[in-house]
Each structure stands twice: as structure tokens, then as C-alpha cells.
Image: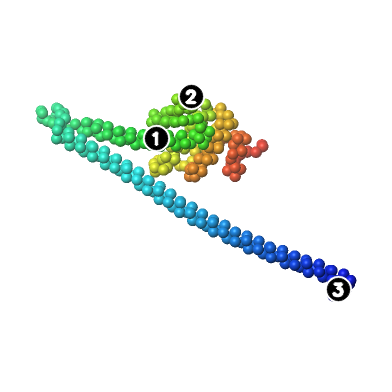
Amino acid sequence: MIDTDDSDIILSELEESMRASAAMCDLMKNSVRSKKLRHANLKQSIADLKAAMEEYEENLQTVRVAQTELDGLKHEVTRLEILEEEYKTARTVESIKPAVIEDKKEKPGAEVIDENKILQTAIKITHARFKDLQEELLQDVNDRILGFCKTVGLSQYQSVALTSNPHLKIDKDGSPTSYSNVSKGEQLRLKVIVTIALISVAEERGLGRHPGFLVIDSPAAQEVNPEDLSNLINGLEGLCKVLPSLQIIIASVASPTLLAHIDDKQRLHAKGDDFLW
């Protein structure tokens, strides 16, 4: 018991402090409840996003399987059409104008069908079918290359055309040119994105057996300036996100450009006087 002249004042101060503490406690409880509610909402949002992502991946896989099956059916239809043309040609040769081959070992006037003509016709039809398919594939590859050009700093390229020879024709700033006439830095970037374009088209169509990784040896040693190298590495970072199945390994000196773009966890290089291996 406080028995002083100031006891009433002290008691009043304690009561005021108690009320302030109680108010602060209520405020903190409200804050905790609010944060718990926000946490629950965030957890639900994360769960919803994960579910949506899984559904999207399932749909994407279904589309890929369907595309692979469709490509297989197209190839089978093409094969059957070629066989049909061969059969028609053989029937025509048999019924209308059989080729005559004189065989000295056979009786004079013996007539047999010239199978070489049938084979030549079949080859001609097959070549025409193959050319159509090749042109379709190359157009798809050219579209990919042009799209990838922007990611590696080649935005001045207005069109590219990879031919079956193979040659790479380029429209740069409105003027026609070719791979051999552009700078070393541009050549390096073109080699990389053309390869990636071929891999991506083959992967989508279920063609080829590429292992899924590229090795780029000493990109900075090919008279490539730091800006071109930076554009290449920046572009490769973006392309790896577009093609997550592709792995790219770069063997090079530990230049500032590479060290600035490649995360420490994804690189191995010798520091100071240390050996790499």
C-alpha cells in the first residue's frame, strides 16, 4: 500500500499506463489477425497459381503430343501418296506403252517393262514431296532465326533466309547481304541462333535426336567486341527461358562481360593463381 502525499498521482499514472498498455495490446492483436488473414490469402493465391500452372503444363504436353501425332500422320499420308503415284505409273506403263528391251538371251521380240523408268518417276515424285516439306521446315526455321535476332542485338536484320545449300541470305537495314559479309561479332551470334532455331523446330516437330546442349568455345577470341559478346550472352539468357530443355556451356576466359552476366552458381573459373582443375 502506498502511503504518501503523491499516492493518488502515482495511482493515476499507473492506471493510465495500464490503459495505454491494454490499447497497445488490442492494436497488436488486430495487427496479428490482419497479418494472419493476409498470410492465408497469400497461401491460397499460391495454391491457385500452382494449380493453374500444372493445368497449363498438362495442356501444353497434350498439344505437343497431338502435334507429334499429326506430324506422324502427315508423313504417313505423304508416304502412301507416293506409293499410290508409283502404282499408277506402273499400271500406266503396263497397259499403255510398255517399254521394249531387247535381250539377246531372250527370244527375238521379247518385251519387258523398263523398271528404271518406274524408279525414276518414283524418285521424281519423292523429290517433289521432299522439297515441299523442306521448304516448310526452312520457313519455320527462318521465322525463328529472325525472332531470335532481336534477342541478341541484331534488330537491324529485316529478313533472313537459310537455304538448303546451305547459305544464309540476309536483308540488313534494307540492303541484301550474306553471312560472309557481316562482322565477326554478327557471325558468331548468327551461328548460335541458327543452331538454336534448328533445334527448337526439330524439338517441336519431334524430329532429330539432338542431345539438348550446345558448347560455345572461346566466343571472345573471334574478334568480338565486348558489346557484341554482351548482346550474345543476354540473348542466350532469354533463349534458355524460351527453351528450358536446352543447356548451353561456354568455354572462355573469365572476362568481365561473362562474369557480369553468368551467376556464380552457374560458372566455374580459376581465381588468381588457382588452377581450374
Say which of 225 and 142 sits in front: 142
The quarter of the image holding the C terminus is top right
Mark 2 belongs to which amino acid? Asn
- Residue 2 — which label? 3
Q: Residue at x 32, y 43 (%)?
A: 74
Give neighbour class at mark 1: few <14, some 14-19, many 20+ (Cα, 10 Å). some
Residue 139 x, y percent position in the rendering = 39, 35
Gap between marks 1 and 3 measured at Cα:
96 Å
Q: Residue at x 27, y 32 (%)?
A: 124
Q: Quadrant of residue 9?
A: bottom right
Kind of element beneath mark 1: helix
Q: What's the amino acid at mark 1?
A: Gln
Residue with the most extreme left position: 108
**Which residue corresponds to the image point at 44% horizontal and 31% vertical from the top-left?**
160
Is residue 245 in sight in this rendering?
yes
Left or right, residue 209 beside residue 27: left
Amino acid type, residue under disc 3 in the picture: Ile
Which percent across, then down, holds residue 154? 51, 32
Q: Hey, which quadrant is residue 141 in on the image?
A: top left
Which is more N-terminal, label 3 or label 1? Answer: 3
Q: CA distance from mark 2 to mark 1?
A: 22 Å
Residue named by callout 1 = 139
